[in-house]
């Protein structure tokens, strides 16, 4: 590699690393598709089959064989999500004689149910999702690529006095995926690709703690922070019927994360405040995608794709603490599908315009398993974008997407003290109304 090219590559990787450390976003389940601003404009229809940027490293490594030469790309998508909540009858169930139950053994509880205290809130956030890619020829039949992306993330944030504070205050997952890949042309029509992923996950979860000795007067607060590395792989295949028609299949493996960190409790019961170790095992799912592309003439092209994600792996979120206690949330997610269709129009050699639509299915099966940490629902999204090519080497892309979330609800009950179970419970009943605006900018360069 020429020294100047090597320095440019290091600059791209360094910049991407700085950006990825800030990445956080809201997605279908925990999944982030926004790895390409070019793709954003066509609602990610066709994956990387249109061959209009360098994102094949992530979407399907076999698609790298559609290009030649050395390429780099850096992009950034800002995701602004509004997720408004409306309290629809949240209640707290506890003994009216709570003081005697706690201090006088043998006292039978006399239960009452009262409206939960606190206001509704907007848990949406505004965050950035970056991407960086590099691809180059190894020889006439092989190409190498490197991608740095954030494939899974979530971010919700509520006030400490909101009605669902005992269920969630802040929930944040950030991932960094470093993905080198190889593509190989088997013959004039058929290509394959494969890559490995080193994935870093960093999670923060917090919530208020109900203090039975100062009920509804002074809450405690708990925060768990944990991180760790795990590894996976991705595969792809591409078939070109002719220069204008092609299909592809891609697969990314599940990744088994084991994260370690600490839980910090403050402003709570004497003897329970302080910091202890925390550990959790979480499997992020594998997914399988199919894509198709057809160029109709010199100006118009159409593309589509479908993706299945194996979210049924996510049955529970269990956190084990060094003091022997445990936090367990039943998730019971289901497999989900997304369907995309898009179009591109080459107005002239300098300008390309795009549009697309995607239907994204939520993996959350019912209100019982929808929590304010991830208040996900089915969504329809519409994308628009364009590329400007000031020369044969540089491309500047802009993309916009509007997301309309289907109305959804929560009807979820939790224990407010760990033991005895059922003595004090809180049932959170909410309606969610959500929408999102995604704006991205990106630059790609061919050496």
Image (cartoon, helix red, strand yellow):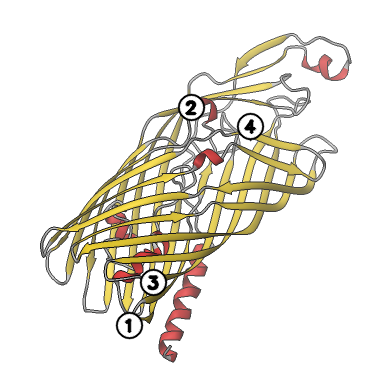
Residue on which the image places disc 4: 166
Residue on which the image places disc 1: 447
Q: In this view, does 392 lie above or below 82?
A: below
Give the alpha-carbon distance from disc 3 to disc 4, as whole Å: 53 Å
- Looking at the image, can residue 397 be seen? yes
Residue on which the image places disc 3: 184
Give the alpha-carbon distance from disc 1 to disc 3, as whole Å: 21 Å
Viewer-side label of 4, 2:
2
Residue on which the image places disc 2: 366
Residue 114: percent from the left, percent from the top?
62, 15
Give the alpha-carbon distance from disc 4 to disc 1, as whole Å: 54 Å
Residue 233: percent from the left, percent from the top?
51, 60
For marks 4 and 2, the one nearer the N-term is 4
Label 4 secondary element:
loop
Give the alpha-carbon distance from disc 3 to disc 2, as whole Å: 44 Å
Mark 3, Cα crowd under 10 Å, few <14 / some 14-19 / many 20+, is: many
Viewer-side label of 4, 1:
1
Mark 2, Cα crowd under 10 Å, few <14 / some 14-19 / many 20+, is: some
Viewer-side label of 3, 4:
3
Q: Are marks 4 and 2 in contact (CB under 8 Å)?
A: no
Q: In this view, does 348 lie above or below 303?
A: below
For marks 3 and 4, the one nearer the N-term is 4
Label 3 secondary element:
strand
Label 2 secondary element:
loop
């Amino acid at each position: 590699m020429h020294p100047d090219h090597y320095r440019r590559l290091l600059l791209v990787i360094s910049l991407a690393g700085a950006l990825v450390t800030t990445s956080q976003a809201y997605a279908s389940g925990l999944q982030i598709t926004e790895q390409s601003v070019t793709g954003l404009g066509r609602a990610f229809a066709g994956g990387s089959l249109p061959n209009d940027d360098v994102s094949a490293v992530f979407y399907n490594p076999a698609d790298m064989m559609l290009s030649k030469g050395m390429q780099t790309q850096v992009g950034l998508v800002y995701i602004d999500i509004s997720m408004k909540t409306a309290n629809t009858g949240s209640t707290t169930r506890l003994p009216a004689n709570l003081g005697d139950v706690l201090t006088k053994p043998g006292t039978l509880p006399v239960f009452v149910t009262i409206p939960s205290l606190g206001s509704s809130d907007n848990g949406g956030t505004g965050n950035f999702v970056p991407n960086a890619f590099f691809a180059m020829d190894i020889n006439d039949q092989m190409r190498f690529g490197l991608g740095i992306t954030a494939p899974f993330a979530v971010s919700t944030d509520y006030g400490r006095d909101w009605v669902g504070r005992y269920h969630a205050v802040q929930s944040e997952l950030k991932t960094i995926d470093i993905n080198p890949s190889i593509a190989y042309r088997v013959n004039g029509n058929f290509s394959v690709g494969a890559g490995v992923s080193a994935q870093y996950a960093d999670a923060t979860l917090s919530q208020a703690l109900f203090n039975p000795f100062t009920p509804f007067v002074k809450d405690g607060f708990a925060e768990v922070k944990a991180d760790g590395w795990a590894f996976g792989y991705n595969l792809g295949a591409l078939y070109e019927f002719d220069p204008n028609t092609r299909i592809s299949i891609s697969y990314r493996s599940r990744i088994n994360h084991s994260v370690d960190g600490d839980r910090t409790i403050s402003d709570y019961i004497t003897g329970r405040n302080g910091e202890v170790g925390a550990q959790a095992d979480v499997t992020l799912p594998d997914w399988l995608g199919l894509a198709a592309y057809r160029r109709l003439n010199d100006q118009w092209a159409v593309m589509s794709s479908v993706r299945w994600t194996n979210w049924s792996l996510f049955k529970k979120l269990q956190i084990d603490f060094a003091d022997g206690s445990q936090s367990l949330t039943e998730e019971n997610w289901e497999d989900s599908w997304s369907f995309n269709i898009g179009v591109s129009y080459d107005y002239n050699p300098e300008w390309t315009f795009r549009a697309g639509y995607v239907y994204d299915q939520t993996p959350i099966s019912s209100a019982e398993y929808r929590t304010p940490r991830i208040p996900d629902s089915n969504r329809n999204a519409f994308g628009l974008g364009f590329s400007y090519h000031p020369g044969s080497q540089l491309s500047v892309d802009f993309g916009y997407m509007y997301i309309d979330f289907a109305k959804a609800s929560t009807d979820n009950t939790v224990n407010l003290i760990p033991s005895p179970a059922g003595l004090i419970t809180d049932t959170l009943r909410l309606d969610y109304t959500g929408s999102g605006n995604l704006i991205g900018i990106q630059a790609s360069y061919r050496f």
